[in-house]
Image: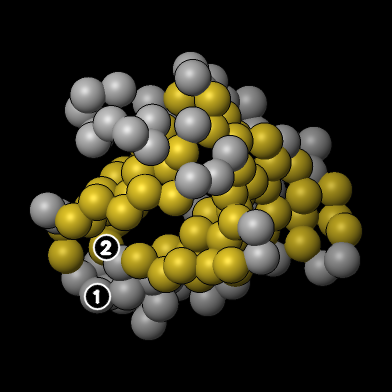
């Protein structure tokens, strides 16, 4: 499996099996991170970390404070895709990190970006 990143008419394929999705909260300016795994059933959320609370971002009751971040495992079924808003309001975009490298998408206002599992030899929509 690979990750397809769709931004408008552009498609980028990353040959990875897992990634971290990170961003800064638009109001609190604190970092959020989620660890995702790519499976045949979809994108599976394995864990999450947030640096603080406030403005609708309270950590769940089972979160544990570790190294300055609330760490927890969300209870969410596999997702066929993730839609990432691109407001341009945070000064940064979404950061997708895997295998020691990070790629930023959506730093400027535009239509949402889409993340979805894809086979490296098939275009999105033909999986």
Which image quadrant: the C terminus? top left
Residue located 49% across and 46% down the image: 15
Of residue 69 and residue 36, the one placed in the foreground of this image is 36
**Residue 59, percent from left and from top:** 68, 48
Specify whether residue 25 is in view.
Answer: no
Total marks shown come to 2
Answer whether residue 89 is visible to the viewer in this image: yes
Q: Is residue 41 left or right of residue 126?
A: right
Instruction: Say if 114 sits above or below 43 in the image.
Output: below
> Which type of secondary structure does the marked residue at label 2 adopt?
strand
- Farthest residue in the left direction? 9
Quadrant position of residue 99: bottom right
Tag 1–tag 2 contact (CB < 8 Å): yes
Q: Position of residue 27 (x, y in %)?
A: 45, 72
Spatial CA distance of label 1 from label 2 is 6 Å
Q: Any mark on residue 108, and which?
A: 1
Chain-order first, disc 1 or disc 2: 2
Q: Which residue is mark 2?
A: 86
Q: Position of residue 76 (x, y in %)?
A: 56, 26
Image: 122 above or below 56: above
């Amino acid at each position: 499996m690979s990750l397809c990143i769709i931004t408008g008419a552009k498609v980028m394929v990353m040959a990875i099996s897992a990634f971290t999705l990170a961003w800064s909260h638009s109001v609190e300016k604190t970092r959020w991170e989620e660890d995702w795994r790519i499976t045949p059933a979809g994108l599976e959320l394995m864990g999450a970390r947030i640096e603080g609370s406030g403005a609708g971002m309270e950590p769940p009751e089972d979160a544990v404070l570790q190294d300055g971040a609330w760490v927890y495992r969300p209870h969410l079924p596999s997702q066929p895709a993730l839609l990432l808003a691109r407001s341009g309001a945070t000064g940064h975009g979404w950061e997708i990190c895997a295998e020691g490298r990070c790629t930023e998408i959506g730093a400027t206002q535009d239509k949402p970006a889409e993340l979805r599992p894809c086979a490296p030899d098939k275009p999105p929509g033909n999986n």
